[in-house]
């Protein structure tokens, strides 16, 4: 079902329900030639050497913001910074059909998620799910607006406003 956008005034054929962050913020901030020298990245994991020469590790996850109805949910495909030990353990479990039985992993959100502010560095839990589905991300700060919305859910109007903001 389409909508007329309150930001641009244009009609969009369907409501945007998810957005995927391309890279972790610290990696995105690098110049292209620095990325080529210091970053290894795939669809689901990323490793890079920061300015001090330390390795930093990231994995993908899916942060759900539930709606009043199932078709109103909004999803952010995000990067989570994890420890080296967790990064390698996640790698072992990623394609394991029983990986979802493992305890959650903990890390920090590595993307700024507009229109929310201050999301980089938010503590999160990362729970493996079925092999074909990205791990679920739960914001651990109940007072941050993103954490509140994840727990309380969004109404249809809030999902549309979020989609409009992300589109523009």
Image (spheres, helix red, strand yellow):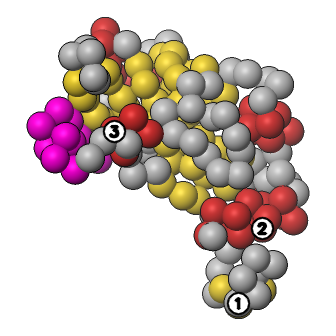
Image quadrant where residue 132 sits:
top left
User: Quarter holding the N terminus?
Assistant: bottom right
Identify the residue at image location x=39%, y=52%: 22
Given contact means CB atoms under 8 Å apart, are the residues at marks 1 and 3 in contact? no
Residue 96 in the image: above or below residue 60: above
Identify the residue at image location x=28%, y=23%: 50
Viewed as shown, does residue 121 lie left or right of 68?
Answer: left
Q: Disc 2 marks which residue?
A: 160
Q: Earlier in the sequence, mark 2 or mark 3?
A: 3
Q: Disc 3 marks which residue?
A: 27
Q: CA distance from mark 2 to mark 1?
A: 14 Å
Residue 136 in the image: above or below residue 93: below
Instruction: Pinpoint residue 5: horizontal percent, then vertical percent.
Output: 76, 81
Q: CA distance from mark 2 to mark 3?
A: 30 Å
Residue 53 in the image: above or below residue 147: above
Can you tell which mark lies on residue 10? 1
* Secondary structure type for disc 3: helix
State which mark lies toward you, 2 or 3: 3
Q: Which residues are magenta?
A: 32-43
Q: Nearer the viewer, residue 161 or 61?
A: 161
Q: Nearer the viewer, residue 85 or 40?
A: 40
Residue 54 in the image: above or below residue 9: above
**Is residue 38 highlighted in magenta?**
yes
């Amino acid at each position: 079902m389409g909508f007329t956008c309150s930001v641009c005034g244009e009609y969009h054929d369907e409501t945007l329900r998810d957005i995927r962050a391309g890279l972790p913020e610290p990696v995105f901030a690098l110049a292209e030639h620095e990325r080529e020298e210091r970053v290894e990245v795939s669809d689901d994991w990323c490793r890079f050497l920061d300015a001090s020469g330390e390795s930093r590790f990231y994995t993908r996850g899916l942060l759900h913001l539930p709606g009043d109805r199932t078709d109103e949910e909004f999803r952010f495909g995000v990067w989570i910074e994890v420890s080296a030990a967790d990064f390698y353990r996640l790698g072992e479990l990623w394609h394991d059909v029983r990986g979802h039985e493992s305890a959650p992993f903990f890390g920090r959100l590595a993307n700024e998620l507009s229109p929310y502010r201050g999301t980089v560095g938010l503590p999160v839990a990362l729970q493996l799910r079925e092999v074909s589905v990205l791990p679920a991300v739960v914001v651990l700060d109940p007072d941050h607006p993103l954490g509140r919305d994840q727990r309380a859910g969004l109404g249809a109007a809030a999902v549309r406003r979020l989609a409009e903001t992300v589109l523009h």
